Structures are given as structure tokens and as C-alpha cells.
Image: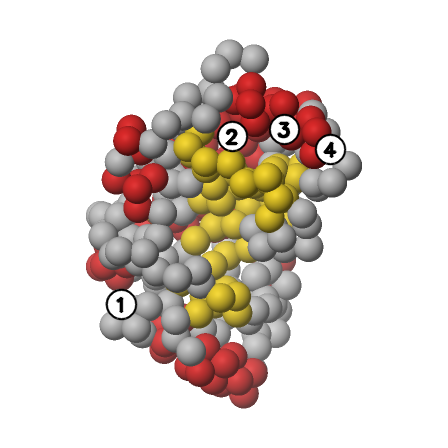
């Protein structure tokens, strides 16, 4: 395979990056967002200051890890910005590994093409804020097309892949009342959701109480029962220097 530029990090085995699986993790540099709480900011702000890791070295190690590792997670930064992503995924899958992508969902064209080509088994998408331009800009540090974010959400929701939506809760940046909002089965895009019974207010209150206990945890955003439904909380890694 030709050299793959922009690989800035590699973790051989992780038990936390892909729920239920043992995964290797590849980090690609560069990001189009500037989330104030980003803990990967050297990757985001100064990717050129980090040495590229040669793909051949990673490939050799992955071959040794076959049988131990279920899949490879590609994260960043924002991996969909990198032109090498499709061929990297092709290469990884040809070695027999499953693939997972972490994304901010800002490039739905890229995401859809990867899905159409069958290059992904799972996707974790950060939903930074309520789908309003002002809230999104505040939480991502950049003007963002909320329409693109919404497109990615719906593409993933109908994809049949293992999908996870995540929202990082930062006191003062994103208030708790914004996070766990009930699903309204009215005029929904996907007809399969019409008539679906939303979570009761009592259940939502229980979820909010869990989040309120420690707002520096990460909560999955609740869209609809059966889509991204479980209010699972996972510890956020220690925050680095805010950008
Ligand atoms: S989307 Fe935000 S949190 Fe993720 S890498 Fe980019 S700046 Fe960091």
C-alpha cells in the first residue's frame, strides 16, 4: 500500500473505544472544529508538529494482533477530513478486522460514501449541542452547518450499523436541560419512527438526575427509543488545557 500520511497515534489494544470489543485505535491529525473542551488539541491545532507513524509499522503490529483484537477504531481529530481514510479502511478490512469511525458528523458526503462502500461496521458521532447554529458554534468553536450535522445523524440512524451518539456535557457551556430531550414522534423524517412511544417524562427525569449527579461525565444523547436509547454514562478522560 502507498504511504498513508497523517497517522499521528496508535494504541494497540483498547477496551473503552468500542463498546463490547477489543480494539486498536488509529489517530489521524487535523480537525475543522475547535471544541473548547477538546483533550486532543495538539492533534487538532498542530498536527504537523507530531511525527507521522509509518503505516507499515502499524500494519505489521496489526498482523501480530490478529485473533486478539476485534477491530480498528479510526479517530482524531476529525478523520473524515483526511483523503487517506477510505484506503486506510479498505486496507484494515482486507486484514480481517472490523472498522469503527469516530466523527463529528460535519462531512455527511464523506460519511455516506464510506457507508455505501461498506467500509464501516460502527460509528460514534459526537452531537455537540442542540441542532441550532448558535448553540453548535458555542460548543464546537466554529460556525457549523447544522443541516450537515442533521444529515449525518439521519444517515447513521437508518444505516443498520452499530451507532452511538455522544454529547459532552460541560458546565457553563451546555446546560443540562438541553441534553436529555424527549423524542417527539411527530412529522419525523424516518417513517419507522412514526407512532413510536417516546420515553415517559418520568424516565427522562431519572436520566436527567443521573446526568445532574456529575455534569463532567459524558452522556449519550437520547433521540428515540431503539436508536440511541441508553443513558449510559462513561467517564470523560481528564481535561487537557482548554483551547
Ligand atoms: S471535534 Fe472537537 S473534540 Fe473532536 S477532535 Fe475536533 S476539536 Fe477535538
Q: Mark 3 = which residue? A: 61
Mark number for residue 67? none
Q: Mark 4 = which residue? A: 66
Q: Nearer the viewer, residue 199 or 240?
A: 240
Determine the secondary structure under disc 1. Answer: loop
Q: Is mark 3 within 8 Å of ligand 1?
A: no
Q: Mark 1 = which residue? A: 173
In the shown orientation, is residue 87 left or right of residue 129? right
Q: Is mark 2 within 8 Å of ligand 1?
A: no
- Cα separation between marks 4 and 3: 9 Å
Mark number for residue 113? 2
User: Number of marks in the image?
Assistant: 4
Q: Which callout, 3 or 2, points at the residue further toward the start of the chain? A: 3
Residue extending farthest to the bottom is 202
Determine the secondary structure under disc 4. Answer: loop
- Cα separation between marks 2 and 1: 33 Å
Asked if 149 appears above or below 2 in the picture, the reply is: below
Nearer the observer: mark 3 or 2; the answer is: 3
Nearer the observer: mark 1 or 4; the answer is: 4
Q: Which callout, 2 or 1, points at the residue further toward the start of the chain? A: 2
In the shown orientation, is residue 90 left or right of residue 76? right
Determine the secondary structure under disc 3. Answer: helix
Tell me what residue is drawn at x 55 percent, y 46 percent: 123
Q: Which callout, 3 or 1, points at the residue further toward the start of the chain? A: 3
Amino acid at each position: 500500500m502507498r504511504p498513508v500520511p497523517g497517522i499521528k497515534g496508535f494504541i494497540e489494544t483498547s477496551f473503552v473505544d468500542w463498546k463490547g470489543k477489543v480494539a486498536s485505535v488509529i489517530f489521524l491529525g487535523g480537525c475543522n472544529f475547535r471544541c473548547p473542551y477538546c483533550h486532543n488539541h495538539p492533534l487538532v491545532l498542530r498536527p504537523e508538529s507530531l511525527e507521522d507513524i509509518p503505516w507499515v509499522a502499524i500494519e505489521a503490529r496489526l498482523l501480530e494482533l490478529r485473533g486478539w483484537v476485534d477491530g480498528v477504531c479510526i479517530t482524531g481529530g476529525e478523520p473524515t477530513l483526511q483523503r487517506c481514510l477510505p484506503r486506510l479502511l479498505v486496507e484494515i478490512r482486507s486484514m480481517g478486522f472490523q472498522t469503527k469511525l469516530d466523527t463529528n458528523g460535519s462531512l455527511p458526503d464523506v460519511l455516506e460514501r464510506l457507508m455505501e462502500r461498506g467500509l464501516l461496521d460502527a460509528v460514534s458521532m459526537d452531537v455537540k449541542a442542540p441542532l441550532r447554529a448558535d448553540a453548535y458554534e458555542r460548543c464546537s468553536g466554529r460556525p457549523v452547518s447544522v443541516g450537515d450535522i442533521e444529515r449525518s445523524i439521519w444517515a447513521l440512524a437508518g444505516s443498520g450499523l452499530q451507532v452511538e451518539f455522544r454529547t459532552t456535557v460541560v458546565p457553563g457551556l451546555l446546560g443540562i436541560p438541553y441534553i436529555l430531550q424527549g423524542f417527539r414522534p411527530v412529522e419525523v423524517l424516518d417513517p419507522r419512527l412514526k407512532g413510536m412511544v417516546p420515553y415517559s417524562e418520568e424516565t427522562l427525569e431519572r436520566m436527567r438526575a443521573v446526568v445532574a449527579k456529575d455534569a463532567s461525565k459524558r452522556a449519550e444523547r437520547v433521540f428515540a427509543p431503539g436508536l440511541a436509547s441508553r443513558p449510559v454514562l462513561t467517564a470523560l478522560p481528564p481535561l487537557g488545557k482548554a483551547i
